[in-house]
Amino acid sequence: MFYVICVNILVFLIFLAFVYDLKFRSCGRLPGPRRWPIVGNLLEFLWLDSGAIFDRLISYSKQYGEVYILDFLYDRTVVCASPSDAKRILTSYKFLAKSDDYGKVSEWIGDGLLVSKGMKWMWHRKAIAPAFSTVALRQFVPVFSRRAEEVCAKLEALADERPGEPVDVLPELKLHTLGVLCETVMGIPCGEEQDRQRQYTQVVEELKSILYWRMFSWFANFNTLFRLTPTKRRFDELVALSRSFTHDMIDRRRKIRERSKLVFDQDGNIDFERLDPRSKYSPLLDTLLNARLPDGTTSPNAGLFDGRPLTDEEIQDEVDTFSFAGHDTTASAMTFILYNVAKYPEMQERLYDEIVSEIGTEFSELNFQDLFKLCYMDSFIKESLRLFPPVPIVARIAIDDTYVNMVDIKAGTSVALNIFSMHRHPAYYPDPERFDPERFRKSPD
C-alpha cells in the first residue's frame, strides 16, 4: 500500500511538472533566472528577509530588464518594473483579478476594498470616496496637529530615558497613526484605550508575519496544508482579536449616532453645541452606515442612496481593511521619513528653517493652508516614499489572453508590479540610491 501511494504521488508530481512546463512555455520569450522543476525559483527566496528579497528583485531587473519571469511552485509570475506597462496593466480590464496572495489576506480582513474586485470594488470605492474628500481632510488637520504634539512629546521622553541610544519609533508611530485614524476616519474617541490599541497593533504585526511566511513557504502556501499547522490556530485567534477591536469601533460609532439624534434645543432642532464634535463630520464609518448600494432591482446608474444598505459583514470588512492598511502603511512611511531626517542633518536643518520661516514657532495648531507652504518638506517626503514605498509590490492576474511588453500573456498569469524597483531605476531617477529631495522640486519655469 505504501508503494502504491508513493507511485501515485510520483505520477502526480510528474503531471504537475508537465503542466508547469506548458504554462512556462507560454511566456517563453521572457527572460528570468534559472528555474527548478516544480519549485521554480522558490528556493532563491525561501530564507530571505524582506530587505534581501527586494535587493534580489533589483538585481534581477538589472540583469533581465524591466519585465522578466519568476516561478513559484505551480504559479508563474511576470515581474514588471516598467512604468508604462504598469499603467496599462492597472487601467486594463484584462487585469481586474487580484493575485492569490490577496485571498490569503482576505481570511483576515475580508472582502473589503483592498481585496474585492469588479462591480463590488467599484461601488464600494464610490461609496467610500466622500470620507476622504478635501473637505473631510481639512476638518482632520486640527486632530493631526494635536496628535503630532503628543507623539513628539512621547518620542522625546523615550529618547531622554536612554540618552545616546537608538529609539525604535515604529511601535509608537503605529499607536499614533491608529489613534489618529480612530478619531478622524472612524469618528471614535480613543484617547483612553491605548492598551487595547497597542494590543491591536501587535496583533497586526503577528498576522503580517504569518502571511509573509505563507507566501514564501512551499508548505504553507497550500491552504490545505496550512490548515493542519498550529500556526493556523494561532492565525484564527489573532483574526478574532483583530475583528473584535474593529467590531467594537463600529458598535461605538452606532451608539454615538444614536445619542446624537437625541440632542435637541428648545425649538426641536439639533443642538450641535451639545453633540460630540465628531458627529458634525462625516467619517468613513458614517459614510458606510449611510451608503446604499445597487441590488438586483436597482439600475446600474443608480446613486449611492438608491439601493440596499451595506450588510454588517460588508461594513466590518471595510473597517478591517482601513484599520489595518490605514495605520500600518502610514506608520511605516513616517518611520522611514524620520530615519532620513536623522540620517541627513543638513536636510534636517533646512526642514526646520522652512518651518520657522513659513509658519513660525508661535502657533496653537496647524491649519490646512499651512501645509502648502512647506515645499521642501513636501519634496523630502516624496523622496523618502520613492526609496521606501510602504506598498512595494502590487499583483494582478490576467483574466484574458493579453500581452505585456510585446510578450503574450495567457489568462491566469500573475503579474507583479515591482514599485520598489521602478523607484530605483536609473532611467527614471538618475543616481537612484542617492537621497535627493531636489528631484521633486518644481522648476522656476
Image (cartoon, rainbow, N blue to C red):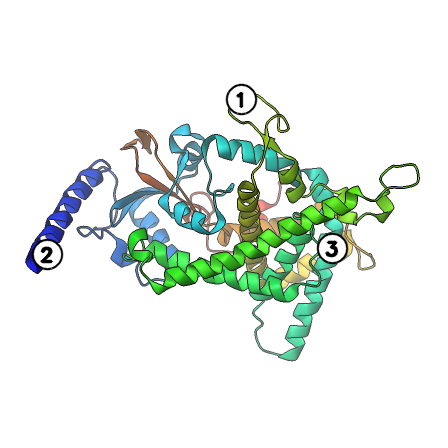
Amino acid beneath label 2: Cys
Question: From the viewer's perspective, is 358 left or right of 166?
Answer: right
Q: Nearer the viewer, mark 3 or mark 1?
A: 1
Residue appearing at x 68%, y 46% in the figure: 254
- Front residue of 201/42: it is 201
**Quadrant in the picture for residue 145:** bottom right
Residue 6 marker? 2
Q: Is residue 296 above or below residue 312?
A: above
Amino acid beneath label 1: Thr
Q: Quadrant of the C terminus?
A: top right
Q: Secondary structure at mark 2?
A: helix
Question: From the viewer's perspective, is 95 left or right of 324?
Answer: left
Question: From the viewer's perspective, is 140 left or right of 7?
Answer: right
* Label 2 with label 1: CB-CB less than 8 Å: no
Q: Is residue 437 above or below residue 289?
A: below
Residue 145 marker? 3
Earlier in the chain: of badge 2 and badge 1, it is 2
The residue that label 1 is drawn on is 297
- Front residue of 359/180: it is 180
